[in-house]
Image: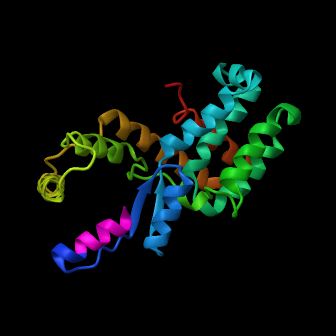
Amino acid sequence: MWIFLQNLCVEYTGSQFILKKLHVDFEKAAHQAAYEVFENVQLIACRFHLGQSWWRKINSDSILRIAYKKENDELGNWLKSFFGLAFLPNHEVADAFVELMSVCPNDKVCSEFSDYVFNNYIDDESPFPPNIWAKEPMFDPRTTNAVESFHRTYNSQFYKSHPHIHLVIMVLQETQAETMTKIRSIETDSYKSMSFIEMQKINATIMAYDEYLRNKCSKDLLKYLLKVGNKYLGIPL
C-alpha cells in the first residue's frame, strides 16, 4: 500500500511522499511494512489498544480477571497499575516495570501476565517496545480511533472491492478538501477536537504526573501508576 501511495504521489504531484509520523495499531506486520518504505518514520501506537491487549490477557485468567474487577484488591490494584506505564517517558518504563515487580503480591499468579508484558512491550527487543507507546501525559491523544473512523468513512465511498483509479483519486481529493477545512477550523478555535470529559481526564493525569515529578521516588511512582492506571483501564467490548 505504501509503495502504491508513493508512486501515486510522484505520478500526480511530482513530489515524493515523505511520512514522518504514523499512528498505528499493535500489528507487527504493519510496523514492518511502514519501516520498509519509510525508514525514519516515527511510529505512535494507540494507548487504547494497548490497554485492550493487556485486558484480554488478564481476562484469559480467572484469578486475574476476578481480582482486576474488584475495588481495593491488592492483586487488582497491581494489575491496574500497569495501565499507567503508558503515561511515563519511554526511557523510564523499564525501571517502572521493575518497581511494579518489586511489589508483586503473588509471584506464581502474576508471572504469566508480567512475563507477557515484559516479552511483548518492555524489553528493547520486544515486538512493541516502549518508544512507540509510552509518553508523559499531554494534550496529544495517542489513539488510532480517528484513523479507524477515517477508514470506515473512506471505505463507505466505494461499492466495489477494486474501484477505478479515477474514482479513488476523486474521493481522496474530496477527503483532502474536507480535512483542510477542519484544520483551518482548528487553527481558528472554531472546531471542538476533544470532548470536555476527555480534556478533564487528561488534565487530571497531567496534574498527577507533575505531583509525581516533585519527589520522583518509588513510593510516588507506584502511587502515580495506580492513580492513572485506574483512569485508563482496558474494558470488555
Quarter of the picture holding the N terminus: bottom left
User: Can residue 47 be seen?
Assistant: yes
- Along the line of sight, the residue nearer the viewer: 169 or 152: 169
- How many dots with numbers? 0
| Residue occupying the point 73% across, 52% down | 119
Residue range of the region highlighted in magenta in the rendering = 1-9
- Along the line of sight, the residue nearer the viewer: 121 or 27: 27
User: Can residue 135 be seen?
Assistant: no
Residue 5 percent location from the top left of the image: 30, 66
Q: Residue furthest right?
A: 108
Residue 237 percent location from the top left of the image: 49, 25
Residue 216 percent location from the top left of the image: 66, 55
User: With 41 as the anchor, is 112 left or right in this view?
Assistant: right
- Along the line of sight, the residue nearer the viewer: 227 or 6: 6
User: With 116 as the anchor, is 15 left or right in this view?
Assistant: left
Q: Is residue 215 above or below residue 157?
A: below
Whether residue 107 appears in magenta in the rendering, the answer is no
| Residue occupying the point 88% across, 33% down | 108
| Residue occupying the point 55% across, 33% down | 233
Q: Is residue 215 above or below residue 55?
A: below
| Residue occupying the point 53% across, 25% down | 236
